[in-house]
Amino acid sequence: CSEAEMARVPPPGAPDRPGGLTPPRAFNLMFETRVGAAADAAAAAYLRPETAQGIFVNFKNVAATARGFGVPGGVAQIGKAFRNEITPRNFVFRSREFEQMEIEYFCSDEGDAWRACHAEWVAACRAWLVDRAGLRAELLGEDVHEDLAHYARACTDITFRFPFGEQELQGIAARGCYDLTQHQEASGKSLEYVDQASGRKYVPQVVEPSIGVDRLFLAAICSAYAVDEVGGAERTLLKFSPLLAPVKAAVLPLSKKDPALLEIARRVHDDLKRRYNVQWDAAGNIGRRYRRQDEIGTPLCITVDFDSIEDGCVTVRDRDSTDQVRVKVEDVAAHVVHVIEGL
């Protein structure tokens, strides 16, 4: 804080003086490093605290060379970001190194054109978190910022109820023309977009959806974790969206010794692994194998039993309902694709 602000702090011993105050110190939330062998100030550099600025400085290049690019339109990027957090905590929720996904969506500079664009992105991001990432809708909330950053015209956070409280999951900010204008002024190079239809030149406004992959991973785990009861016994499982589940299916041969049964199981496994990450599990009784797959969120278990040799069918078990259906071997791949991708 400033000297004027410090002057307003009550002196030591005063009854209304806050406790534990230290002399003011400088904080830098960016990681500083050196480029090259020299250790002087000229060699100072900083690890990026966000991925966005790389998109802005390349905007002119993308607009001129990317076939089909136009405004409205966006550029997406995923990559490492670094922030010198004062208090990293809560597992991977807040860390000093993280993976960030951002979209810079460029729209018209005319008036309040950004408002409709911002509202559309808030709705689209919320729908994506539920429909594609598989988060439970009842765990999501919204925080519309009143106190905005210097560059922002509006900002809405989609929040998630973590075990340690409701926190920001994804931010959707309307950044106006601020970033492109700043780079344009500092570089002396025009970052104006040329509308091919009208010939008009302008600096577009930007709406930025941004989310950390690590934070989304944590939300997905928290949302998917469940405990229920099957056959009178407690069961722990991860109810991942089939699209998000790391293992899409497990092939479980009922016997490790019968060549005919193993041949069918291998055929099913080899066919599925061309498209998905599929596990082969032949150890232990079938109930334990089901539980192992439930705990890692595998949507489907495919059991090859002795009847499979006679009727050419396998048993496909659904993770969430534990319902089982018999499916012909030649139809297994299509059945799995339907469950995972809805096709």
Image (cartoon, helix red, strand yellow):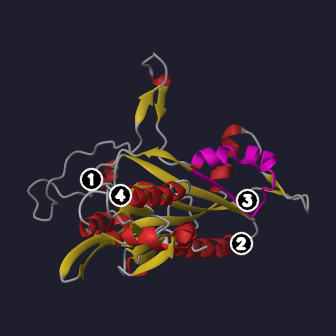
Tell me the distance, in whole angstroms, between the alpha carbons under discs 4 and 1: 85 Å
Mark 3 or mark 1, which has the lower sequence index? 1
- Say whether marks 3 and 2 touch (CB < 8 Å): no
Which residue is disc 1 drawn over? 7
Task: For marks 2 and 4, give the one nearer the viewer.
Answer: 4
Residue 216 visible here: no
User: Identity of the amino acid at label 2?
Assistant: Ala
Spot occupied by residue 264 in the image (x, y as percentages of width and height): 46, 60
Tell me the distance, in whole angstroms, between the alpha carbons under discs 3 and 1: 44 Å
Which residue is disc 2 drawn over? 113
Magenta-colored stretch includes residue 73: yes
Tell me the distance, in whole angstroms, between the alpha carbons under discs 3 and 4: 67 Å
Q: Which label is found at residue 204?
A: 3
Task: For marks 2 and 1, give the one nearer the viewer.
Answer: 2
Tell me the distance, in whole angstroms, between the alpha carbons under discs 2 and 4: 67 Å
| Quarter of the image that includes the C terminus | bottom right
Mark 4 or mark 1, which has the lower sequence index? 1
How packed mark 3 is, by other alpha carbons closer than 10 Å (few <14, some 14-19, many 20 or more), is many
Q: Which label is found at residue 258?
A: 4
User: Identity of the amino acid at label 3?
Assistant: Pro
Specify the segment rendered in magenta.
53-77
Q: 222 or 4: which is nearer to us? A: 222
How packed mark 4 is, by other alpha carbons closer than 10 Å (few <14, some 14-19, many 20 or more), is few
Q: Which label is found at residue 238?
A: none
Tell me the distance, in whole angstroms, between the alpha carbons under discs 3 and 2: 10 Å
Mark 2 or mark 4, which has the lower sequence index? 2
Q: Residue at x 77, y 61 (%)?
A: 71
